Amino acid sequence: MEKDKEHKEDHKNEAPGQNKEFTIIVNGREKVVTGKEISFSQVVELSFGTTSKPNTIYTVTYKRGEGNKPEGTMVDGDIVKIKNGMIFNVTATDKS
């Protein structure tokens, strides 16, 4: 009983849905992510690993998205709401 109380206390300050897992598709591969939103940087990292290549430009497009913008493009700094089955396509281009 005491353990249940501690468990509830641990999660009391978390907003509902914050730790919900979603399965999304990034460049044809299933990825499981936690949270209601995903950033441009997170999508690129899921696709290519690190994003620290200075001469690379990344392009992110998505479809089957949430709400009133079910498809579109993302640029660095963007954040979108996600849902199960959402599809992201990421391409890398060398600026050289």
Image (cartoon, helix red, strand yellow):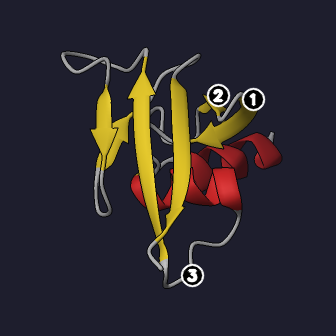
Q: Which residue is mark 1?
A: 30
The answer to the question of whether label 3 and label 2 lie on touching residues, with beta carbons closer than 8 A, is no
Question: Which mark is first along the chain, 1 or 3?
Answer: 1
- When the figure is inspected, residue 17 is found, relative to residue 84, above or below; the finding is below
Q: Quadrant of the N terminus?
A: top right
Q: Amino acid at mark 1?
A: Glu
Q: Earlier in the sequence, mark 1 or mark 2?
A: 2
Q: Position of residue 44 (x, y in %)?
A: 55, 56
Alpha carbon of mark 3 to alpha carbon of mark 2: how far?
A: 22 Å
Q: Earlier in the sequence, mark 3 or mark 2?
A: 2
* Label 1 to label 2: alpha-carbon separation: 5 Å
Q: Mark 3 or mark 2, which is nearer to you?
A: 3
| Quarter of the rendering containing residue 73 | top left
Q: Which residue is under mark 2?
A: 25
Front disc: 3 or 1: 3
The residue lying furthest to the left in this view is: 68
Q: Are marks 3 and 1 in contact (CB under 8 Å)?
A: no
Q: Position of residue 47 (x, y in %)?
A: 66, 50
Element assignment for label 3: loop
Tell me: 74 left or right of 24: left
Residue occupying the point 28% across, 53% down:
78
Q: Are marks 1 and 2 in contact (CB under 8 Å)?
A: yes
Identify which residue is drawn at 71% across, 28% down: 28
The local crowd at label 3, few if under 14, some if 14 to 19, many if 20 or more residues have their Cα within 10 Å, is few
* Secondary structure found at label 1: strand
For residue 4, side relative to residue 90 (left or right): right
Q: Amino acid at mark 3?
A: Ser
Apparent side of residue 95 relative to residue 3 in the rendered image (left or right): left
Residue located beneath label 3 in the image: 52
Relative to residue 29, is residue 76 drawn left or right?
Answer: left
The amino acid type, in three-letter code, at marker 2 is Ile
